[in-house]
Amino acid sequence: MPLYSYTAKTADGQTKTGTKEIASEIELAHWLRQENLFLTSAQEQELGQTTKKTPGWRRSFSFSLKHISLVEKMMFTQNLAVMIGAGLPFNRALDALGAQTKNKYFTQVIGQVNESVRKGTMLGDALAKFPKVFNELFVNMVKVGEASGSLEKVLKILAFQMKKDSELLSRVRGALIYPSVIVVAMFGIGILMMIMVVPKLSQVFKEMKTDLPLSTRTIMAVSNFLSQHWLIGLLLVLAVIIAGRFALKTKPGRHYFDWTILRLPIFGPISQKINAGRFALTLGSLIESAVPIVQGLNIVAGTLTNTCFSTSLKAAAEAVQQGLPLSQCLSPYANFYPPMVIQMIEVGEETGALGEVLKRLSDFYEEEVTNITKGLAAIIEPVLMVVIGIAVGFFAIAMLQPMYSLMESM
């Protein structure tokens, strides 16, 4: 039976080394888990055999494209959970995942994480070095899993959350493709009409020497500007886009944008349900992983994209820390959270099953969002057709009205 020298970690991050005569590395990992230790690396000590060393990873990232999709992170998390559950040590699991990943940047990130773990760093701390890849929720959940000895379970929860986010994103994108194509096409046709058709009609109207209605003069002025000053128009559009992006990076600008989204007729209720469901699922998972509720609220606040929700959760965390129940702390923000959320939280607090109640609440809102997004295209298309019809009607009336006026005067 081979002899292995190993390096392992305790739940509080202390490094332990030793040797064990055992049949395989997987059985070694299982044995260590029974001893409340996590295997980080192992080397067989039989004569004539050496363990392959993982090559060093370059420190500098030479790739300009540093995007990692949600699906790639979900697959990484899901596969890591399976490998850890099978008893593989972290370094072998990360080696395998780095080799499987097609994204070169992600391969380098995994390699850097693997190198840190091999040197004795806890997995959560190693992941925290890449905040643009692994967000605060991911890192904190991994740390909780390491501390409680339930890392496999935590990784499965994270993979499940990312799967749901990916499915939602795909549904929303799918519903918006057709309306987006129509809008772009109509803008393109409108610009061509302004540049090529309206100038010819404007010349006819000038020869008619008749008073033109305000709508016609407005369209002619826009057409004249686009025809003669198209470069200025292009620069103005770019300036608006840049100014908008800059405003969204400021706290007041982002808060106003998120506040506006919540009040839009179609997208407001969808955004509210998405954020409420994500809040419930994440906080419920954290509570079930034995994370204190105040810490959990702060973690969730850092993961929600809508600043109205994140700001309310930070305020609620401060109030909970002073001894108030969560349901009471969220009551002043009833315009953000549907009444059902606050009522269910109150029930969970009374029964002592807040984590379970929150996860059931997230299931409810997930189904609600799924049903809404499935019919999103059917809702948007009639509204879009009405808007396009109004625009086309305005243009047609503005261009034809002077001709009818001239015919009536003859």
Image (cartoon, grey):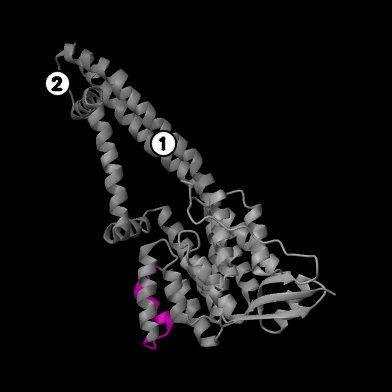
State the image quarter where residue 192 is shown.
Answer: top left
Q: Say whether residue 323 is magenta.
A: yes
User: Mark 1 belongs to which amino acid?
Assistant: Val
Q: Which residue is mark 1?
A: 183
Which residue corresponds to the image point at 23% horizontal and 28% vertical from the top-left? 222
From what the image shows, is residue 29 above or below residue 196?
below
Who's the residue at 28% across and 37% down the image? 237
Residue 221 vertical position relative to residue 97 in the rendered view, above or below = above
Residue 24 belongs to the span the image colors magenta: no
Taking depth in this image into account, of 252 and 133 the one nearest to the observer is: 133
Quarter of the image with the N terminus is: bottom right
Please name the amino acid that badge 2 sits on. Asp
Q: Which residue is mark 2?
A: 211
Q: Circle 2 — which element? A: loop
Q: Which residues are magenta?
A: 322-336
Q: Work out how far the residue at label 1 is from the one at label 2, CA to CA, in angstroms.
A: 33 Å
| Residue 163 against residue 327 in the figure, above or below | above
Neighbours of disc 2 within 10 Å: few (<14), some (14-19), many (20+) = few
Q: Residue furthest bottom?
A: 323
Residue 87: image location, x then y, percent: 72, 71
Circle nearer the viewer, 1 or 2: 1
Q: Residue 115: which quarter of the image?
A: bottom right
Residue in the foreground of this view, choosing between 192 and 21: 21
Helix, strand or loop under label 1: helix
Figure quadrant of the C terminus: top left
Query: Residue shown at 15%/17% (left/top)?
Result: 210
Q: Is residue 92 visible?
A: yes
Whole-percent x and y of residue 318?
36, 81
Q: For the residue carrying disc 1, how many other residues have a C-alpha within 10 Å: few (<14), some (14-19), or many (20+)?
A: some
